[in-house]
Image (cartoon, rainbow, N blue to C red):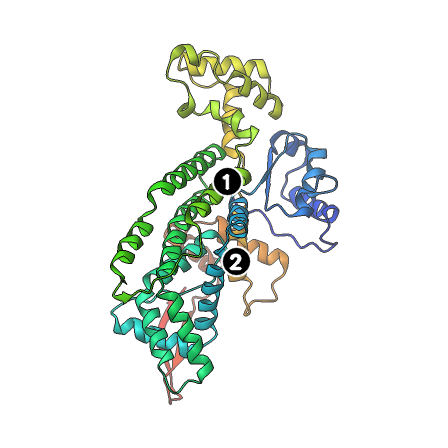
Amino acid sequence: MFFLDIVELSEGTDAKSMYKSLRKSLIQAGLDDEFLGKNLICIATDGAAVLTGRVGGLVTKLKQDFPKVQSIHCLAHRLELAVKDSLKEVAGCNQFEFFISKLYALYNQSSKNARLLQKAATGLNMQILKIGQIFTIRWVASSFRTVKAVWNDYPALAHQFRTAMEDTSRCDTERQKFRGLHKLLTSTGFLADLACMKDVLRELQNLSLKLQRKQTSLVDASCHIQQTIDVLTAMKASGGKSTQKAEQRISTGLFKDVELSESRPKINHLQFNQSIINSLKKRLPEPDLVQMLKPLDKRFWPQQHSARILYGETEVRALAKTLGEPAREAVEEFRDFKLQNRAPGKTLVKLQTASLTYLLSSAECERGFSAVNSTDSKYRNKLREQSLSSLLFVDLNGPSLEQFDPLPFVSSWIKAGHRPSTFWVTGRKAKTEDPRPLWSLLI
């Protein structure tokens, strides 16, 4: 998997213009119709209507020219949609989300409150964690980090709220606001909701990160999804680690040395867990493509020899037809592979290669967007598309700094007749005008 190009949609953002720009970019890279007809098998998108529209979407136009192409809606994005479905369905989740959003606004829009929270955390010998937004356009891992931050910073938050509501230098309205925040934060109901969210989001974060890995295959993703569903189903009965800990502390009336007040949880935890499970099954069902790919993986073969004889032949035949390979030859090679432990034949190798080539998410594109923001910064905002694309190609596909050997390039530069130069990086001390060299670079 590698970055190929970034294209400006100069003619418009409709499906026709996008497809025209896409084909032009592929041709410039040497991927003509003949090559794409033999090798292009999959396209993964984030599910936008202009891409996946059944009548005139980009995927539809691509399939018209290349019938073998399989379209996959990014599993990581579908996971986010599953979480959103559950939040809308279960009562009380919106109140929890609103409280976290108030915390985010409180400490990101006021440097004074952020400084006081840092001071409270230092006084309690804690390491303050940044409280971010929750259930926004970011991945679910970001929401888990926010919930974890509130959980870890619980004593500092309670201490800062209590100090602020007793601060006579603040106006009555502001003190009343902090009094309400302190009352909600230190309630047993909020602690139970926080623990439930932390347990569920931890599992969803792990799943999201697995779906974003480069080496994860479509079959692996299906296994990870089912494993997460099984774990969440088991957690319904016993509760997660944080839930069990919260229940113990609620029984004592004290959590991390903060006194708790009695209140009922806003979220029905059993309903929330079941809603997440139902949403995962609805949004992330096992597609027919995964059913065709599973027989190629030895993990799914039956243990008994009699059950293995005809196992997977229907799926292998269907996959071969999908890829335009001889179906009967594929089945014969598959039989030798599973029953006689022979090396895969030429046709079966193509099917196995395809099984690892099918995409499961567009997370790599999201990483590309992050690289664009780092490269096309406010200091380099006049880069042309071609220059930006070249820089991104090196950044995303090139070796790491640890693997890069600059000596051959330095030697060729000197042999070309260029004079070595010394670059001095200078800085200024406070209240002085004398530049002081910090380090030198010799080329």
Q: Residue at x 44, y 85 (%)?
A: 171
Foreground: disc 1 or disc 2: 1
Residue annotated with mark 1: 278
Query: To which quarter of the image does residue 236 belong?
Result: top left
Q: Secondary structure at mark 1?
A: helix
- The amino acid pointed to by label 1 is Asn
Q: Is residue 343 above or below residue 277?
A: above
Task: Identify the disc placed on residue 136.
Answer: 2
Q: Is residue 129 shown left or right of residue 387?
A: left
Q: Residue at x 30, y 71 (%)?
A: 121
- The amino acid pointed to by label 2 is Thr
| Position of residue 187 measured from the top left corner of the image (x, y, whole percent) | 36, 63
Q: Is residue 109 above or below residue 290?
A: below
Q: Secondary structure at mark 2?
A: loop
Query: To which quarter of the image does residue 260 belong?
Result: bottom left
Q: Is residue 425 visible?
A: no
Task: Identify the disc placed on residue 34.
Answer: none
Q: Is residue 105 visible?
A: yes
Q: Residue at x 63, y 29 (%)?
A: 38
Q: Quadrant of the C terminus?
A: bottom left
